[in-house]
Image (tube, helix red, strand yellow):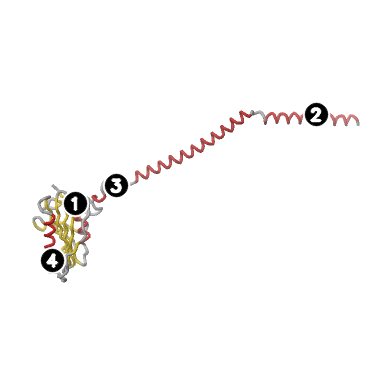
Amino acid sequence: MKKSLLHVALLLTIGGTLAACGTSESNEDTSSNTPEEAVEETIAEEDKDKETVNDEVGSEEKAAEETTAVEEEAKPEETADDEAAPPSEGTLTESDEQPYELHVLPGYALTSEEPGKDSLYKEDDPSVFMRIETFASGEVDFSQAEAQVKETLKAVNAEAVNAEAEIAEGQKLESADIVKSSSFEVPSAEGKVTGVVFEQENQLVRLTIFDSEAAQATADFIAMGQTIKRVE
């Protein structure tokens, strides 16, 4: 009996000793890093996190720059002067008798009416047309051209259904190369007649438009008239 108790006591002593050794080793492992080393590890981890954030921000900025570059390349080229750009539709046509060219819209045709006068007419109704007269700079005074246009409109008005109608101001031409312009209109038996005079740096242009109620082509004629350019 005494031997058994002795054995038990011996085993408990050995077990306690081993447990104490294990706890000491564990504490030694846990506290193996000095305070300075712990601080250094914390700083290193923070620096690593900052590098990760910076890498992510840099990637986003690079992606944004690449997107902007692609968008800039995709933009259409802009003209130096949008007003001076020719219309998107129409064929550049040169007069056979006068030193000018213009853009002719689909459904219209340009022909020589007589020396010094061209006719730009509607193909499906030649009675709807615009007479074009051009003069070199200084050849005809602007006020003189205006007076001639008004005289033409008065003659038309005399034959109109409403002969008492007065000459009214019409749509003026607006373009980068037009120095000044004026426009007048009167009713006619068929619809309306419009007279336009405009001056460019190297020429003066006089237009007379004969329109009808059915065609309503005055806006087209004025748009084409604005594209007239002198050809030397």
The nearer-to-camera label among 2 and 3 is 3
Mark 3 residue element: loop
Give the residue type that dot 2 points to.
Answer: Ile
Q: Earlier in the sequence, mark 1 or mark 4?
A: 4
- The Cα atoms of the two marked residues, 3 and 1, are separated by 24 Å
Crowding at dot 3, Cα within 10 Å, few <14 / some 14-19 / many 20+, comes out as: few
Residue 16 x/y as whole percent: 79, 31
Q: Residues within 10 Å of mark 2 (few under 14, many from 20)?
A: few
* Residue type of the residue flagged with mark 4: Val
Measured in 3D between alpha carbons, the distance from the residue under mark 3 to the one under mark 4, in whole angstroms, is 44 Å
Distance between the alpha carbons at the discs numbered 2 and 3: 94 Å
Q: Residue furthest bottom?
A: 161
Q: Earlier in the sequence, mark 3 or mark 4?
A: 3
Residue 135, image x and y in percent? 11, 52
Residue type, mark 1 in image: Val
How many residues crowd around disc 1 within 10 Å: few (fewer than 14), some, or many (20 or more)?
Answer: few
Q: Earlier in the sequence, mark 3 or mark 1?
A: 3
